[in-house]
Image (cartoon, helix red, strand yellow):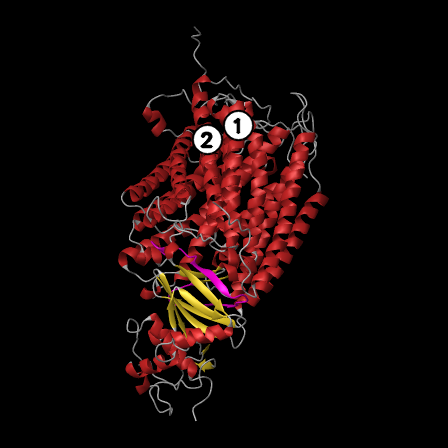
Amino acid sequence: MFTNFPFFPQQASEQAATIDALYFFLLAVTAFFAALIAILVAVFATKFHRKHDDEVGEVIHGSLALELLWTIIPLGITMVMFVWGAQVFFHMTRAPKGAMEIYVVGKQWMWKAQHTDGAREINELHVPVGRPVKLIMGSEDVIHSFFIPDFRVKADVVPGRYNHLWFTASKPGKYHIFCTQYCGTKHSGMIGWVTAMVPADYQTWLSGGSSGGTMAEAGAKLFTDLACITCHVENGQGRGPVLRGSYGKQVLLEGGQTTTFDDAYIRESILNPHAKVVAGFQPIMPTFQGLVTEEQLLQLIAYVKSLGATPAK
Amino acid sequence: MDTTPAPLNYLNNGHTLGSWLLTKDHKRIALLYLLSITVFFFLGGFFALMIRLELLTPAADLVEPDTYNKLFTMHGIIMVFFFLIPSIPAVLGNFLIPIMIGAKDLAFPRINLLSWYIYVLGGLFTIVAAVTGGVDTGWTFYAPYSTSASNSNVILAGLGVFITGFSSILTGLNFIVTVHRMRAPGLTWFRLPLFVWAHYATSLIMILGTPVVAITVLLVAVERGLHLGIFDPALGGDPILFQHLFWFYSHPAVYIMILPAMGVVSELVQAFARKNIFGYAFIAFSSLAIAVIGFLVWGHHLFVSGQSTYAGLVFSIISMFVAIPSAVKVFNWTATLYKGSVSWDSPMLYAFGFIGLFTIGGLTGLFLATLGMDIHMHDTYFIIAHFHYVMVGGAIFGYLGGLHYWWPKITGRMYPEGWAKFACLNIFVGFNLTFFPQFIVGYLGMPRRYAMYAPEFQVYNVLSTAGATILGIGYLIPMIYFVWSLKHAPLAGPNPWGARGLEWEIPSPPPTENFAATPIVTAGTHQYAPSHEVGIV
């Protein structure tokens, strides 16, 4: 009945081995201390087992040396855990420059992915092996969490903001996607598969799956349809700031503060335009809350991003 | 036939229902709590059993996913708020703290009774929420699911938690004032039993933390009922704010559950090794250290939420610090056994079990405090296993150990020791079989709160369910022999264990006013060797 008796998940990403190494270190240290305590308790309980009814124990009040010893040694060991864990964490949270970006939207109860070239999929995610992939994730309703155990990556998908995770798949195959933040009735059905493919297969898959234009093209169309273009004109004479060449830069705001022109800022400016107005402009932009879906927001972001950091000619 | 009336004690001093429901005696109030938390324990246990039966197979075939979601929610709410948090403080603490410090009662006997009524009222709200459709948010009430998406009785269940919080605040207040103001002459702070120190630390958390969770669930009710944007981004709120507020209480609440159990274990190792504790001051202060540092670690519940990397670093290192006082306690208990006169009576078996299981629970906490490791483990069964090792292996083992140790004092009767040892072994085996496989299936990636799961996880779930069955039987056995013992077991006498401490110097069961005359204390507790000068390390 049970032929499958695994102890560890597969190592299917380049990060997996680093995290497993940390796991084995933690296992070794904690197993040692658990065994030490268990053995000491067993030995003392046996060796000093009560011999007769009136027997009492010896008077020992304690030992400062021992107290220091079993304070300082555990403290030192936990600091090693902290530093090692922090290093791994920094690596996990900082996607390399040039990582391939895929946009993911969670909703009760499915995962929707959009590739920048326009391919879309539901509860599936196709990625090439050997190339860093960064997921930019938002939610349409409640909090979800995107988890690929065989890659050892996870991040909550929180409405109202974008969270990221990144990985480099290392082994072609199919791997579980689980939602790990409880999200209602079909939480345990909010699952899917990542398919990691060799780059050539991935290219074939992309060309077969794409329907129409890229995400940026879809965003450009929205940019016209929603009349963003009437104010955000390229010549700098519009009522809104020029978007070309702004992505990734620092923006000076009304009131003297600055902010980074990134995904979160674009999102906020579309939904809540008066929160951070660019210096020199009037707060006259209307909100688009309720007029654009999460996926359309991502297309608009992809479009603005495609205008890049190259200034207008 | 022997017609001499039994000496007057707190049990036979009044037999009417009114004499119980209007009592101001801390010992009777403790028994009222004992009865009510036992009801909630078996209710929560029933939900756990249903969860385990559903998880026997990968498909959702025993109950619908919606029902499953309500089962684990009710299991969590009941076990956390209506069993674990009140368990040791409201039963054993209530009964013993006045006696241990040589007082007639707690400082505010009426408030003590009021806190039980508040607890019952909160419990009724929760039960009504359960029987009129249930609640499906998980015990954590995460927004915006709880405020905008769930179609269940969130407000009713939230009010239950809100109300019962006040019972906890009042108990904490009562304990703190009692320990400050009502100690017998000569009972200095450093002569206090460690059980009292642990409850003092627990009480600090109760009065400082509980108001925050009360406000948080109230805000959930406000957003849900009035659509005021607090947590839901669609209304202009911030869902991460909810998590900060919720865990600001609910992480320290873990220490409300475990600190009293640590206090019990400190008493057990001394009584059954017939030896004063090794490193008294270190154990006493480590309780306070846990209470204080415990307030600064909540952010480790947000490592995957999108919280800033630097906040993650700070919460990770502080979570490492909170492990140290726990380690200090474990080492000191172990050292106390050295050159003791160690008996293997059933309460001591629970203490051994506690030390081993709490050590595993605590050490696996280090995995979760380690940033890079937590990302993979977060919200998987590894967490479930970890906190059940602390909550069941720790808190419940402490509670059962304490209940067996003080049962003769509370009831005046012994219990069948053979059955008690058998039940303890049963619980130990059942517990490990239930929860150890969950570490493995958690690392494999099985998420928590799943009604359906991938087939490769089944073997571990079958083991877990088998273990839960054994564990459930283990819990029933003490129920039976404790009830049986009330009439049929031999009388215990004032001090059946040969233990030291003020509670063992008065009759069993104690008279209503505890002491005929206020005792004068000249030494710390658990001084077994004769004519020894008392000193502190």
Residue B288 in view in this figure:
no
- Residues in magenta? A157-186
User: Which is more N-terminal, label 1 or label 2?
Assistant: 2
Q: Residue at x 63, y 39 (%)?
A: A38
Instruction: Give the CA distance from mark 2 to mark 1.
Output: 36 Å
Pointer 1 residue? B422
Q: Residue at x 59, y 43 (%)?
A: B359
Q: Is residue A301 left or right of residue B100?
A: left
Crowding around mark 2 (Cα neighbors within 10 Å: few <14, some 14 to 19, many 20+) is many
Q: Is residue B268 left or right of residue B413?
A: right
From this view, report whether residue A4 is shown above or below residue B19: below
- Residue B415, percent across and down? 50, 22
Helix, strand or loop status at disc 2: loop
From this view, report whether residue A186 is shown above or below residue B55: below
Q: Is residue A300 left or right of residue B295?
A: left
**Which numbered disc, 2 or 1, marks the residue closer to the eye?**
1
Dot 2 and dot 1 residues touching (CB under 8 Å) = no
Please identify the residue farthest to the right as the structure is shown.
Answer: A65
Helix, strand or loop status at disc 1: helix
Pointer 2 residue? B105
Are labels 2 and 1 assigned to the same chain? yes
